[in-house]
Image: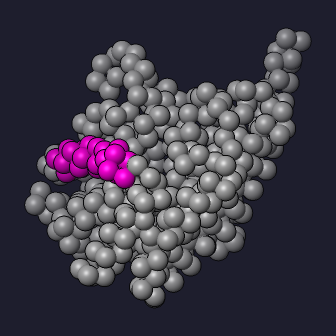
Amino acid sequence: MEGLAERLGQYLLAFCKWAAAAALLGAVCGVLGAGFHLAIDWATEFRMAHTWVIWALPAAGAVSLLLYKLCRVGLDVGTDLVVRSATTNEHVPMLLAPLIMAGTLLSHLFGASVGREGAALQLGGSIGHNFGERLRFDRDDVQVLTLCGMAGCFSALFGTPLTAAIFVLEVIQVGAMGYNALLPSIVSSYTAATMARAMGAVPMAYALQNGTPAFRPVLALRVAALAALCALVGIFFCTCIHKAGRLAARLLPNPYLRIGAGGLLVAVLVPVFGLYDYAGAGGHMIYQAVTGGSASPLAFLLKLAFTALCVGVGFRGGEIVPTLFIGATFGCVAGPWLGLEPGFAAAVGLVALFCSAVNCPIASIFLAAELFAPGDLSLFGIAVAVAYVLSGYFGLYSSQEFVFSKIKREILHKKAK
């Protein structure tokens, strides 16, 4: 009995320690994430009301790089470093938090085709990592707090707390979730989401026009076919993102010339061809595809090209919101050819492409639940499973590690392509 009481005491102490630390960290991330969320919304509204600001995009890109140089933070410091630090404990600069916020805000204000999850993961990871170091937590605990910070800021920015908590556990090492971080990640994520909503940050959510159709074998086959196509688009998207960066660096080794040239190209193409919907993250286009069942046939390709260009030349932000844009618009266009209702197909495409790009199947299913609130997740589950397997070992994050094979029962320890 004494041994049992001692073990229960240890569990209770650990529970209280992580609940308190994660709640405090989640509150901080919620406040900062909500403030950043509102700032991004303001920047987007300002840009859409004053379309001429896109001509300042080259200068905005140069300013964001200059800020990194002045703060002595390497230009290559980004999401991959935060992902690595969750397993290697590599130091994450504290200045990364304000730098990524400033850089991403400039990108959105002046029209770079980037998302905001890169900022969320880097902001939260930087805060969590340095929070643990300042409190002198041990190596393993600092890694857990890094995940908690990532989950908190992701949750505050997107309003999907369960997805955020599971995503940070899955994305580091595919196939090997660290369940020791489950409790603190969930506490941090829900605390941050609560704080963000209290401050007026509106969570992402979409109402399907005709709801989620009931499961039928024929319908499941159609969904599987769409998911297979999304896996191919995901492979192409990830390949373009990585190759664009290498190609841009080879053509223009100077980072200031590189981002200036890329920004100028976007600034010319957008007004000349009227492509304002593809500047910035493009959240309104996701809404239009999912709730209205409407998308241009070339929308997904244009967004893919603009995102590869902007990320490749060095604009700060992320790729997940553009991924959702590409998936929703592709699904909306391709779905009807397979006999699927366009709005529902857009939702399936969004979730399937997200899974193929980040290799997080469980988080993808929760994303469907939190974004669309479907009564039945079976069709989304099929789409996620198909996209996960057929996307192979490609991914947005080059530091992501595949611990287990997707098709065999074997250990891989393979880096994402």
Q: Quadrant of the C terminus?
A: top left
Magenta stretch: dominant secondary structure: helix
**Could you say where residue 154 lies in the image, as x and y percent from the top left?**
57, 54
Seen in the picture, residue 84 relative to 411 is either above or below; the reply is: below
Q: Residue sitting at 85 percent across and 24 percent down?
A: 9
Q: Residue sitting at 73 percent across and 26 percent down?
A: 139
Q: Residue sitting at 46 percent across and 34 percent down?
A: 400
Where residue 135 sits, quadrant-wise, is: top right
Q: Is residue 16 visible?
A: no
- Residue range (magenta): 224-252
Q: Nearer the viewer, residue 322 or 209?
A: 322
Q: Residue furthest toward the right?
A: 2
Seen in the picture, residue 42 relative to 92 is either above or below; the reply is: below
Q: How many marks?
A: 0
Q: Is residue 147 left or right of residue 306?
A: right
Q: Nearer the viewer, residue 117 or 58?
A: 58
**Could you say where residue 360 lies in the image, as x and y percent from the top left?**
42, 40
Q: Nearer the viewer, residue 286 or 309?
A: 309
Seen in the picture, residue 344 relative to 143 is either above or below; the reply is: below
